[in-house]
Image (tube, coloured by chain):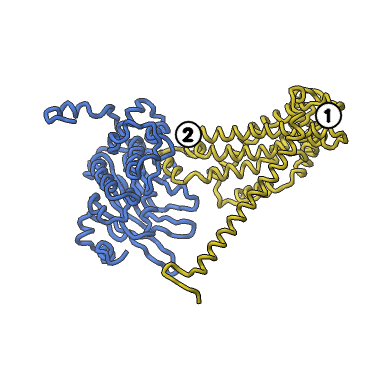
Chain colours: A blue, B yellow
Amino acid sequence: MLKGDDMETAQATEPAVRLDRVEPAIADRSDPAAVAAVQVPPVFQVTGLSVTYGSHLALADVTMDIRSKAVTAFIGPSGCGKSTFIRCFNRLNDLIPSARVTGQVLYHEDDLYSPTVDPVEVRKLIGMVFQKPNPFPKSIYDNVAFGPRVLRRKDELDGRVEMALRRAALWDEVKDRLKTNALSLSGGQQQRLCIARCLAVEPDVILMDEPASALDPISTSAIEDLMHELKTDYTIVVVTHNMQQAARVAEMTAFFSVDVGEDGQRTGVLVEYDETQTIFTTPADPRTEGYVTGRFG
Amino acid sequence: MTSTSALGSRRALTQDRVINWLFLSFLALSLLVGFLLLGALLVDVFRKGVGELSWSFLTNPPSSLPSRAGARPAILGTIYMMILLVVLTVPLGVGTAIYLEEYANKNRWYNRWLEINIQNLAGVPSIVYGILGLAFLVRGLGLGRVLLAGALILTLLVLPTVIVAAREALRAVPDSIRQGAFALGASQWQVVSRQVLPAAIPGIATGAILALARAIGETAPLLMVGALAFIAFNPTILGDFTALPIQIFQWISRPQEEFRHKAAAAIIVLLALLLVMNAFAVWIRNRYERRW
């Protein structure tokens, strides 16, 4: 499509509409001294976070920072609370009546769980992609347009939809059938549609809960390529079962494990959190080493 | 014991086949019973009633002379009743179902108490509702023996059924749809109104129409509330009224053979009205399914 010497013009015309990124509404960046103090301030600062379902402690005392404009992966065996943990970042655990979150999650400088924070506002800034592709039973266009419509950003809706689909590397496959039902897409396409749907809201952070575990290898690699693309503009947190995937996409990796208490209760704990390379080559904790070398889990 | 080969025991195979066959015959029998009974009913009604169906039957008021008796007030009463029922039950029933499914915290005692009560109400005999209507609506509120009182009592009668049907339809909407919408920053109201409710509408329509069709055929509560069998004028919402089941009941209890034929004709009209309602439900279902 592009001739070599046409690159400049192509680049200039490529995005139909340039959407201004919305600055996080609950972030306080008015203090330049505080911003300058840390080179790249973390997006999230989690301190002593625990999650209980009724009387069951599902995740205990997690403390970690999430780096900005990078991919952070959570790995660990089933039931280690990594999905529970990722849902704390967009307050999706609020939907479960018995779930209770204690401890602190700072988003930039603001307490995500402060009583003055509306979880609906949080989710506009912190998007999420789920394990099983969950497109709405509507047209491809309506799926992507749902977020902007809900947020009453209906100006240039066509442009927003196109931008989101382009960024999710789906535009060329669906541009001629935007009005067809999203459920007619393949699994991999559906998942990229869910990513496009999330991008159309123009979030700051994208949470991905095992985004490729229901997909075939080719679709999986498409999603991984997409993560590489997107991390220049977005902070990405990804839960994965697949250690190779964590090694391929993530700058930082957190390893979670399960502690079985005397009463048989299974509680997730953060074992180790470091640069991905360190986790996979010279982990500090023997449990991490056992997991990444495949000796257990 | 038995001859066995690589393909398994022969006796076990024959046994499976016999069981299969028995089960299929049982299914065919159940189907046959339903069809035969319905067929017999329809044939009987049509044989007696078709001859009576005429424009004057539809437009004449009842009369003590079989030759001049018509069902106009009863037909109008039933149509008014249908409209009132849809207007009253659908918003109330769907609203209750949405609260119970989407908003209520099931750990709270009052929500569980509500649920149990609604299920119990679905099992209360219709005559009991009629007594309630007589005591509370007709006498207590002084509404009188009017069409509105009848419609209100039928509303109470079918409301639990509509609620249960609507809840089933809402529950059939996968949770991943709700979570996906919430994760995009939609409020609870937006999730319900833009995703969950549209996805549940085909199921709600089917359930609600079936419940309403049942109500339209009810006789006992209307008798209690004071539906009259002999009305020579058009019913109004706040006036004396009758309905097709009442008219049918009254005609059948007459000694003259001719009135029995009138009753059969009225049954055909009632069936036709129910068919129209069901067709409407199918239309809603298809319309909403095609859009996706």
Across and down, in percent, residue A5 comes to 11, 28
Hey, what amino acid is under mark 2?
A: Arg
**CA–CA distance in space, label 2 to label 1:** 46 Å
The answer to whether residue A91 is seen in the rendering is yes
Q: Front-most of A71 and A166?
A: A166
- Whether residue A281 is situated above or below residue B153 in the rendered picture: below
Q: Residues at marks 2 and 1, common chain? A: yes
Q: Identify the disc placed on residue B230.
A: 1
Q: Front-most of A26 and A92?
A: A92
Helix, strand or loop at disc 2?
A: helix
Which residue in the rendered view is the most extreme toward the bottom? Answer: B1
Across and down, in percent, residue A73 comes to 29, 52
Q: Front-most of B45 and B251?
A: B45
Q: Front-most of A164 and A119?
A: A164
The reply to whether the C-beta atoms of the residues labelled 2 and 1 are less than 8 Å apart is no
The quadrant the C terminus of chain A occupies is bottom left
- A22 relative position to B281: left or right: left
Neighbour class for label 1 at 10 Å: few (<14), some, many (≥20)? some
Across and down, in percent, residue B105 comes to 54, 48
For disc 2, the marked residue is B290
Q: Residue at x 77, y 25 (%)?
A: B57
Hey, what amino acid is under mark 1?
A: Phe
Q: Residue at x 39, y 27 (%)?
A: A154
